[in-house]
């Protein structure tokens, strides 16, 4: 999928998205706990990739983490800077991080990979691994499903991922899974999956 189309799609609904999802209080407590366990004690820079309105970057910073939010949607970055003025927010692409090799202590990619076509995931995970310091931590959140498959997301086409398949992709990229979280479809919500993984030597 052309990521410019994704950017345009989110820009067109930015105000509504911010209203619906723009605070960490809207996040499931189990998810916040997972993120806190694996990224809350990182010493060094943590990137919140696809940070949207900046709510999860703000959450990380509330834990004392040196977190920087990166998103490709200018409307989200503008809101994040206004809502969280003490934070650091930048326009950028998760597929081409403007950081030195092995310089990042952690990465949060919370539902920011869901619009990537499956064939593009490996190169993005390789870019994460390039940026990650030794033993750096990656936390991913995705829509979970029995197979890799697209569906009609309210903003633009997204993909479900089986957690086993996602874990295999992470292994190939140089990460080792250390924890996963799964939550079934709850009413109108889709099944949720998350994986925490550590960068390992290859």
Image (tube, grey):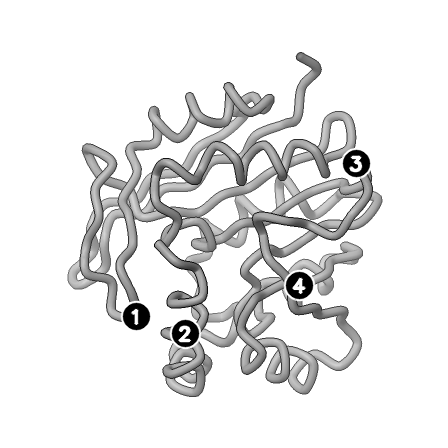
Percent from the top left, x then y, of residue 143?
Answer: 31, 48
Sequence-first tag of 2 and 1? 2
Which residue: 44% across, 82% down? Answer: 14
Left or right: 86 as drawn, with respect to 151? right
Going from the N terminus, do you reach mark 4 or mark 2 first? 2
SS assignment at label 2 = helix
- Which residue is at 83% across, 46% downward? 44
First in sequence, mark 1 or 3: give its number: 3
Choose the circle earlier in sequence order: 3 or 4. Answer: 4
Residue on which disc 2 sits: 10
Q: Residues within 10 Å of mark 3 (few under 14, many from 20)?
A: some
Disc 2 vs disc 1: Cβ atoms closer than 8 Å?
yes
Picture quarter with the N terminus = bottom left
| Residue 101 numbered mark, or none | 3
In the picture, the disc for residue 155 is: 1
How far apart marks 3 and 4 lie (CA) works out to: 18 Å
Label placed on residue 69: 4
Give residue 43's position: percent from left, percent from top: 83, 43
């Amino acid at each position: 999928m052309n990521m410019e189309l994704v950017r345009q799609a989110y820009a067109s609904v930015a105000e509504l998205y911010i209203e619906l999802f723009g605070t960490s209080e809207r996040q499931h407590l189990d998810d916040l706990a997972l993120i806190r366990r694996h990224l809350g004690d990182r010493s060094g820079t943590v990137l919140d990739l696809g940070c949207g309105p900046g709510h999860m970057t703000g959450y990380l910073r509330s834990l004392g983490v040196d977190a920087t939010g990166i998103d490709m949607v200018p409307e989200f970055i503008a809101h994040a800077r206004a809502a969280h003025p003490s934070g650091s927010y930048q326009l950028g692409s998760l597929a081409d991080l403007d950081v030195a090799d092995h310089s990042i202590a952690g990465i949060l990619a919370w539902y920011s990979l869901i619009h990537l076509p499956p064939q593009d995931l490996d190169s993005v995970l390789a870019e994460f691994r390039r940026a990650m310091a030794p033993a750096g931590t990656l936390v991913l959140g995705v829509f979970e499903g029995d197979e890799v498959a697209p569906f009609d997301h309210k903003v633009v086409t997204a993909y479900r991922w089986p957690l086993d398949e996602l874990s295999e992709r992470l292994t190939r990229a140089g990460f080792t899974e250390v924890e996963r979280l799964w939550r079934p479809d709850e009413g109108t919500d889709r099944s949720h999956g998350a994986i925490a993984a550590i960068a390992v030597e290859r």
